[in-house]
Image: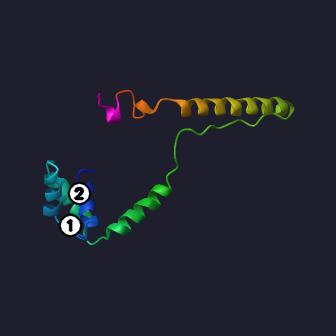
C-alpha cells in the first residue's frame, strides 16, 4: 500500500505512467522511505496497463467475494413443533432488535478497538 498510494496519486495528478522517480518523489515529500524492490515490482506489474481497467477488474473480483460472519443458519422445525418454532423465532427477532438498538446507543469514542484509532493509545 505504501507504494501503490503514491502511484495512484501520480495517476490522479495526470501522470498516466508514473516512473520510479515519480513514486520516490511523492514518498519523499511526506518523509517516507522508498522501497526500490517494491516500486520495481509495482511498475513491472502495471507496465502497459490502464489503471482504470485494473481498478475495475479489482472491483469485479471483490464483488464475487462472499462476506463471512454475521450469518445465522437455522434448522427447519419438525411439523409438530411449527407453532413453537414460530414463537421462538419471533422472540429471537425481538431480542436481536433490542441488541441492535443497544449497539446504536453505544459511545462512539472507541470505534476502532480498545486502544484507540488503529491500536495506538492517545
On screen, residue 36 above or below 89: below
Question: In the image, residue 80 lies at what x, y percent?
Answer: 86, 31
Figure quadrant of the C terminus: top left
Q: Is residue 50 left or right of residue 29?
A: right
Question: In the image, residue 77 lies at what x, y percent?
Answer: 78, 34
- The magenta span reads 116-122
Identify the residue position indicated by label 1 in the image: 18
On screen, residue 48 above or below 92: below
Identify the residue position indicated by label 2 in the image: 6
Question: In the image, residue 68 lies at what x, y percent?
Answer: 52, 42
Q: Is residue 6 left or right of residue 103?
A: left
Residue at 84%, 32% (x, y): give it.
Answer: 83
Viewer-nearest residue: 84 or 14: 14
Q: Is residue 117 magenta?
A: yes
Looking at the rendering, which quadrant does residue 101 occupy?
A: top right
Question: Pointer 2 and pointer 1: residues touching (CB < 8 Å)?
Answer: yes
On screen, residue 122 above or below 17: above
Amino acid at each position: 500500500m505504501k507504494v501503490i498510494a503514491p502511484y495512484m496519486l501520480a495517476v490522479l495528478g495526470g501522470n498516466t505512467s508514473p516512473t520510479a522517480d515519480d513514486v520516490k518523489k511523492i514518498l519523499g515529500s511526506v518523509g517516507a522511505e522508498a522501497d526500490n524492490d517494491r516500486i520495481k515490482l509495482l511498475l513491472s506489474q502495471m507496465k502497459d496497463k490502464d489503471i482504470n481497467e485494473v481498478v475495475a477488474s479489482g472491483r469485479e473480483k471483490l464483488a464475487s467475494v462472499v462476506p463471512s460472519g454475521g450469518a445465522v443458519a437455522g434448522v427447519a422445525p419438525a411439523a409438530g413443533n411449527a407453532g413453537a418454532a414460530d414463537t421462538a423465532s419471533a422472540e429471537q427477532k425481538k431480542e436481536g432488535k433490542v441488541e441492535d438498538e443497544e449497539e446504536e446507543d453505544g459511545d462512539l469514542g472507541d470505534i476502532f478497538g480498545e486502544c484507540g484509532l488503529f491500536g495506538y493509545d492517545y
